[in-house]
Amino acid sequence: MHSDNEALDAERLLTAAIDGRLPDERGRFGPFGGRYIPETLVPAFERLEAGVKKYLHDEEFQREFRNELVDWVGRPTALTHAPTLSARWGCDVWLKREDLAHTGAHKINNAIGQALLAKRLGARHIIAETGAGQHGVASAAACARVGLPCTVYMGAVDMERQSPNVDRMRRLGADVVAVTSGDATLRAAIDEAMRAWVSDPDGIYYLLGSAVGPHPYPWLVRELQSVIGREAREQMLARAGALPDAVFACVGGGSNAIGLFYPLLADKDTLLIGVEAGGRGSGLGDNSATLATGKPGVLQGSYTMILQDNDGQVQETHSISAGLDYSGVGPEHALLQAVGRVSYIMATDSEALEALSELCETEGILTALETAHAFAAAKKWAGKNPGKRILIGNSGRGDKDMPTLTQYPVGVSQHAAS
């Protein structure tokens, strides 16, 4: 599969990543990635890969994609300075506001791009999976935009804790299918979507929501989401006069993080920090911190870091945020950790809740529970690095999380009590 030298040649692999030469022709990011799929799906994936290579960087496709991002999605999204957080944390804090994009999160960038691609490939029906529901909402909206029917597979557990998004998907015309198998969360939803695709690989287009899975999905999603980092880099130089010293993004599958990080890989003076769900503790099954605590293996068509026991059995996960509740992670993130370009750390459920409350009360922004993990980690880092410039990827808004948040009483913050 790969040599030990390949896995350890960090400088060469990082240079290849920065230069855009990864994934390679085998769909690998160094030792990670690839395509591990049933034989029945090989023609569909080969057709998808050929279509991506033909259309993705085609001038006409890019023009249509950019027009949709501007006129329908509402890009560029804002770069917001956070004056109160800056004063409290002792750092210059900036937010890249993907929560202001149409449908409320970064997911729409990928959804409309893949929906446009599906139409070019002659698809008759689009299917998608979702955890937090934001990708499901984005897929439903994108399918309505391009005029294709949409079916969204969602774990029964996630449907209960993300009920507002379930209703939004249905109102946007999607058929939402509850998945009760396995852990009834995102991993199970992906499995069910894959099974549906096998039933009609020619007529169905699978609109995968994160930078995970078999090649070419990690590459395709990264390319569509990199608009986040390109905008943020340009905006930081224009508004702050310099690039950030550190950039934070939450990581589940990793699409918002790779979209923000990828255009900044070459800026080696900028620290890139991904924040995973530390859940309720460090034990297996108590968190979703794949990169911090996982081991390499194959999950849902890709060789990457996964949460598994000593017998190689993939484990169920826990996070207060549905969008981070996943046993694997995108293979490019696994590479970036291996070569030392990106650091991956954890924030717990309680830390995320506290960070969400602080952001609400100081800046008037109700962020998603996923994103709150990035804020929690950024605050800790700021305490040890005063005076630095911080950029946080505000990947989505928290309206969808109200069913969960209502279970936790609103506390009186220290600054409000003082």
Image (cartoon, helix red, strand yellow):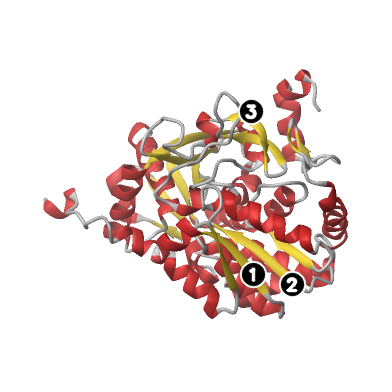
Instruction: Tell me the number on the disc at residue 151.
Output: 1
Residue 161: assigned label: none
Q: CA distance from mark 2 to mark 1?
A: 8 Å
Residue 16 is left or right of residue 108, and the answer is right
**In the image, farthest residue toward the left:** 418
Q: Quadrant of residue 363?
A: bottom left
Q: Looking at the picture, does residue 235 appear above or below residue 175?
A: above
Mark 3 or mark 1: which comes first in sequence?
1
Identity of the residue drawn at 54% across and 73% down: 169
Residue 182: image location, x then y, percent: 55, 48
Tell me where residue 28 appears, x and y as whole percent.
77, 38
Kind of residue indicated by mark 2? His
Q: Helix or strand or loop: what does disc 1 sit on?
A: strand
Circle 3 packing at 10 Å, graded few (<14), some (14-19), many (20+), is many
Q: Nearer the viewer, residue 368 or 85?
A: 368
Q: Earlier in the sequence, mark 2 or mark 1?
A: 2
Q: Quadrant of residue 75?
A: bottom right
Structural distance between the alpha carbons of marks 2 and 3 = 38 Å
Q: Which residue is mark 2?
A: 125
Q: Nearer the viewer, residue 221 or 84?
A: 221
Q: Are marks 2 and 1 in contact (CB under 8 Å)?
A: yes
Q: Mark 2 vs mark 3: which is more N-terminal?
A: 2
Dot 1 amino acid type:
Thr
Q: Provide residue 168's location: percent of width, then percent of height.
A: 50, 74
> Eyeballing the image, is 239 above or below 163?
above
Residue 206 in percent (x, y) is at 72, 61
Q: Residues within 10 Å of mark 1 (few under 14, many from 20)?
A: many
Mark 2: which secondary structure? Answer: strand
Residue topped by disc 3: 338
